[in-house]
Image (spheres, helix red, strand yellow):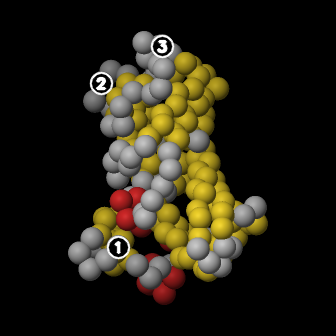
């Protein structure tokens, strides 16, 4: 769920993952929060937990906290997902936390603020919403993925790399739009609004 505010310039992300675990275990999770700007909150099974936030750690100590990254330059790192798969991301977008899972169903909730990017190629300034699903292709399985974007004011979808929303009324201005995916549509969701 993404809520746009401040004239569509900012977004509050509230992401929920339902994870089924075969046993009680602790899983290190790396979260890529594009354009992350403010406090980052994580709850596992309704319990608030600590997250290591890369931009709040001195660069000299980052490799001690983040096990799966390799520095590329002062502002970017490669997130390593195996011997041959990596993703180049901004250092300021990386958050890591350990999720203590119980056997059975677990709920992980992540909430954070982000500044939207802007497409300035046209006369109108159009905010771009991005969300990284990477490395979702490595997930063993998943059920439906729901994406909901809302705002207090009416807005319109200009471009979307995940297709048009469910039941848009001729893509007219509205206060909310929704998508439902049965397969992973892309590594990074990108939607431009106006």
Quarter where residue 118 is shown: top left
Total marks placed: 3
Asked if residue 66 is positioned above or below residue 174 in the image, the reply reads: below
- Residue 43 appears in which quarter of the rendering? bottom right
Residue 174 position in % (x across, y down): 55, 18
In the rendered structure, are the residues bearing label 2 and label 3 in contact, judged by CB atoms less than 8 Å apart?
no
The kind of secondary structure element at disc 1 is: loop
Q: Residue furthest bottom?
A: 64
Residue nearer the viewer, 31 or 38: 31
**Which residue in the rendered view is the most extreme toward the left?**
84
Res 80 seen here:
yes
Which residue in the protein does label 2 denote?
122
Give the vertical position of 123 relative to 117 (above or below): above
Disc assigned to residue 169: 3
| Nearest-to-viewer mark from 2 and 1 | 1
CA gap, disc 2 and disc 3: 24 Å
Residue under circle 1? 81
Camera-nearest residue between 193 and 177: 177
x and y percentages locating residue 116 in the rendered image? 47, 42
Q: Position of residue 188 (x, y in %)?
A: 37, 49
Q: Which structural element holds mark 3?
A: loop
State the separation of the CA atoms marked 2 and 1: 37 Å
2 and 1 marks in contact (CB < 8 Å):
no
Q: Nearer the viewer, residue 7 or 102?
A: 102
């Amino acid at each position: 769920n993404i809520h746009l505010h401040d004239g569509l310039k900012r977004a509050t992300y509230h992401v929920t993952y339902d994870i089924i675990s075969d046993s009680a275990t602790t899983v290190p999770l790396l979260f890529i929060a594009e354009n992350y700007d403010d406090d980052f909150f994580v709850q596992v099974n309704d319990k608030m937990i600590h997250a290591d936030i890369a931009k709040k750690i001195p660069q000299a100590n980052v490799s001690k906290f983040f096990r799966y990254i390799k520095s590329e330059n002062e502002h970017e790192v490669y997130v390593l997902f195996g011997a041959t798969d990596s993703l180049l991301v901004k250092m300021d977008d990386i958050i890591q936390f350990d999720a203590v899972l119980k056997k059975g169903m677990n709920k992980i909730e992540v909430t954070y603020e982000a500044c939207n990017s802007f497409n300035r190629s046209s006369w109108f300034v159009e905010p771009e919403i991005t969300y990284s699903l990477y490395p979702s292709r490595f997930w063993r399985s998943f059920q439906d993925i729901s994406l909901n974007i809302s705002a207090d004011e009416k807005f319109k979808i200009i471009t979307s790399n995940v297709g048009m929303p469910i039941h848009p009324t001729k893509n007219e201005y509205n206060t909310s739009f929704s998508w439902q995916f049965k397969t992973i549509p892309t590594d990074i969701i990108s939607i431009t609004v106006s």
